Amino acid sequence: MKNDRQRFLGDLNAKGSIIRGMTFGNNQGSSVQSSMDLQISGKLSKDVSVLASISDHNLPIQADGYTQTLEEFDRIYLQLNIKEKSILRAGHLELYDDKTYFGRYQRRSMGLEFQTHFGEKNKTSVEVSAGIARSEFHRIRFQGMEGNQGPYRLTGKNGELFITVISGSEQVFIDGILMKRGENLDYIINYNTGEVTFTSFRPILQQNFITISYNYTNRNFSRYLFTGGIQHERERFRTGLKWFVEQDNKNAPLALNLSEADQQILAKAGNDPELMYAPSGVVSEYDVNKILYRLVDHPAGNYYEFSTDASQTLYQVAFTYFGTSRGDYTLKQTTNNGRVFQYAGPNLGEYRAVRKLPSPQKSHVFSYNAEYLLKDGVLGTDFSFSNYDVNLFSSRDTHQNFGYAGRIFGHKTFTKNSWKGTPAFEYQHISSQFHILDRINDVEFSRDFNLPNEFNHRTQNRIIFSFLNQWQNRSFLNYRLNYLDERDAYKGIKNDLDFGWQKNKFNTQGKFSYLDTKADFQNTQFVRANLISEYTGKKGSWAIGGSMEHNEKKFNETQLFDTTSFSWKELFVQKKIGDSARTHLLTRVYFRDNDSIRNNRMENMNHILGIVAESQLIKTEQTTLNALIHYRKFYYQDDLLASNLNNDFVVGNILYNQQLFRNGMRLQAFYELGNGQEAQREFQYVKVADGQGIYKWTDYNGDGIQQLDEFEIAEYADLAQYIRVYTNSVRYIPSNKNKLQIALFVNPSIILNSENSFLKRWNFNFSLNSQNSYFKEDKVVVWNPFEKNSNQILKNQNLLASAQFNPTEKSGWNGNYRFIANNNIINANASNEERDQESHFLNIGYWFNTDFRVDWENSVHHIQNSSQIFKTRDFILNNIETKPKATYKFSETIQAELSSAFRQKKRTDGEEMLKTFDITGALQWDYKKTSVRGNFSFINNDFTGNNFSLVGNQMLDGLKPGKNQVWSLFIQQALNSFIMLNVNYEGRNSGERTIHIGSMQVKASF
């Protein structure tokens, strides 16, 4: 007979869970929680199979990010395979097209996608999708900073400084090479803050050009996305039609409220984004959770002033950053929970009391392609038409919306004996108003042609000719000619010569490029060359080579050089050693010469000596030792410049894994050095639904205003009404960084190869994690991961040492000792806060028999907290606790616990003192599919000092001086083999009113 799960799912394979729950109480409002993680696979019928992944969570968005709203985290993916010819997908779709020349895109949507094909010899493929786009696509390009691993900030397409990046949507290129994400690879990314940091495996140099494309959340308007295509292929001919339709619904704003006046502003703005601003002051009732302003009358013009006077007319005002001396307001440094702006005068500040009005947009691109296959060649064409409207509220500038692009191309290979020759040609035409969805050319195209962007909205014509020569697939010579014309503005001719020659043990490759451009305001000449020759022996290779770039940019009107002109030359020697799979070594020494514009001529700026070593010194089953280091030393020609700049850096890491004594001892160690920048963030606390927060607010000074030092982690769920988010203000500080991670596991019986029963009961563990950032100043590197000085801006150090003594069937004695030391420094709101805690735990237990056991838990804690600006957060605590506990199992279904505890907490730099006596009883009943557990605690707090303070609250753990009672009841009932009902009730009383909190949850596990 089928069980409940089989009757529900049939022949499908499923795993995961579905949870639905709610929380309520007399000290909070009710809230609903839901989550789903479910994977399903199998056959629905003979011809149809299904693959599904469903994830749905309505929890708050990750705290400590740049958001002040709650979002639903969900991901739904369903795929049906029909008769091996058709695929139907539904849910969250990843849509991309990298084959349509002028219509490439990468998007994510929530909707449907259908793919099918028919025909055997003459094949036709159809693909369509329809859905709602929840993200915006953007690409940024910037030059790396010397020795700066990041983080580097990602921004929105309209200049938004703080965005949330869609997970997994990014592509990161360095000098046109695609990077890989991962701590042991090239880069890591914080999707919530939109920051990319490069690892020590990928050092960042000033000559690196970084391009990052990504999707980020956009909740302005409902956006529809329709994509698709039809492709037909014959033996020697193929053709296709593609379409991309992305459009906002201007009548369906999401997290946006546009008034009639706002819509009128947009209607008059046309396609000009500089006209899409509106006054931001809105009358608001006094609310302690808001930063509010009053309107001050002034003969020179009214302005806003921060106010907490509830008797006045108050305004909630949004301020927009415009730049230095382009605004009327500046940011005021306060301890308030939120950013406060003050009036500075016309054009004396950086912010204005206006808000940018997001405009609904549409982007339509239709593309056609055709190719005719020759013998060893092809002739083809591509044509695309675009309709791009940046403001659907306005009918102005409509003529600017339409554009087109087209190309014809071909190539053919000729063969004679060992030689192959492939001439190729291509002609492109792009109208000035054509809209590019993603990109057309390689990511380095704009740099290759000395252009500010790949496409600058000028009519563009391009002619490409190339001739590739190959001999026995061992040597090649390729010449390319590029002519690029931007109508009435730019003409460029680029010559490229690539070659490679291989004979016996020698391999030589080289590249040469020469660009000459004539533009209306600036002419340029750009020469690049690269050459490497390598000799390969039995155990490795030697290589020598060099590269150079010389880029001159001169203004036509003044004949002065552009200061972005540069020149550099680099020579290197490289040695590789490979001894089977055990040893690997790559060493590279290079000398670099940098020139820049000074006094309107190219002058030498500095010399650089660089040493790179990458080694896999040991690789066996028991031992792994890898090392990587990149040292870069600068020699400046100008002594004054040398004294002001410190670009020397060391980036590297060491990874060591060791197994000893038959795996009885295992050591893992990782050490890393680097340079980068550390963010000085500002944060504020935002109120959320009851029970969904992390922090609570207590008005300790009674002024009715939320100060940052009045927020703390809530001890109970009904008090957790706030989350912490970063505000739109970040300043980066150049820093030196280091990291040390160590983990050691020891089993003495295995080490000594002993069968001694006493030794077998012992295990030892040690772990250390230390991450540090220091203000760079004049130091090249900070080697010591334990160094502590006034320049430290970030520290996260955690140490754990433990010893475990386990019971056996013959002896019921057991115990463990743990030492934990945490030292953390965070830099936020223009100040440092440091917390240092050391804790000792000693637990001893004894099993009299399988039904009765006693435990004695003891701990000692030393806690020190210090803040640069909040004196209320300066304190030193010494805490001790001892807690005996007895557990007795009356039967297979009933178990009871009884414990008492004495705790003493003393503030050594103040008068606060707490002595607590706690007695707790618990009873648990388990029978078949039902489990019930109840707890009751009587807590008597003998407190001296100010309990209505941050320190007092922390010492009392959210309770009150005197007598307190805390109780809970938990019921778990299995409704069938895969559905579980959980009911939880908690209560407490501290002499005032009784607090009741209840929750109910249903969980289905597959």
Image: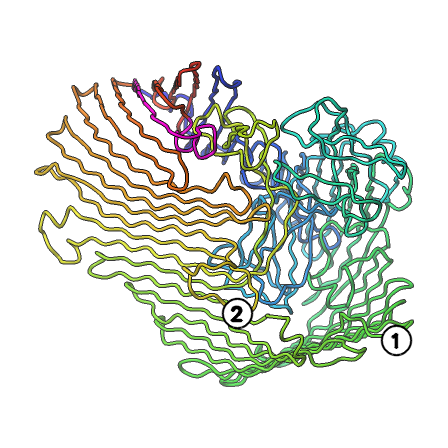
Estimate how packed mark 1 is, as few (under 14), some (14 to 19) or many (20 or more) residues with alpha carbons within 10 Å: few
Q: How many marks?
A: 2
Distance between the alpha carbons at the discs numbered 1 and 2: 40 Å
Q: Say whether residue 418 is visible.
A: no
**Magenta-span inclusion, residue 945:** yes
Q: Residue 923: horizontal and vertical position, in percent?
A: 25, 19
Looking at the rendered structure, the kind of residue marked 1 is: Gln
Image point (42%, 68%), residue name: 627
Estimate how packed mark 2 is, as few (under 14), some (14 to 19) or many (20 or more) residues with alpha carbons within 10 Å: some
Dot 1 lies on which element?
Answer: loop
> Foreground residue, 216 or 225?
216
Res. 351 image quadrant: top right
Left or right of 754 on screen, residue 169: right
**Magenta-span inclusion, residue 790:** no
Residues under numbered marks 1 and 2 in contact, where contact means CB atoms less than 8 Å apart? no
The earlier-in-sequence mark between 1 and 2 is 1
Q: Residue furthest front?
A: 911
Looking at the rendered structure, the kind of residue marked 2 is: Val
Image point (34%, 70%), residue name: 618
Left or right of 918 on screen, residue 74: right
Residue position marked by numbered label 1 in the rendering: 559
Residue position marked by numbered label 2 in the rendering: 780
Image point (17%, 35%), residue name: 845
Where, quadrant-wise, is the N terminus in this rendering?
Answer: top left
Q: Residue 152: horizontal and vertical position, in percent?
A: 61, 55
Q: Which mark is residue 781?
A: none
In front: label 1 or label 2: 2
> Foreground residue, 622 or 272?
272
Q: Which residues are magenta?
A: 930-958
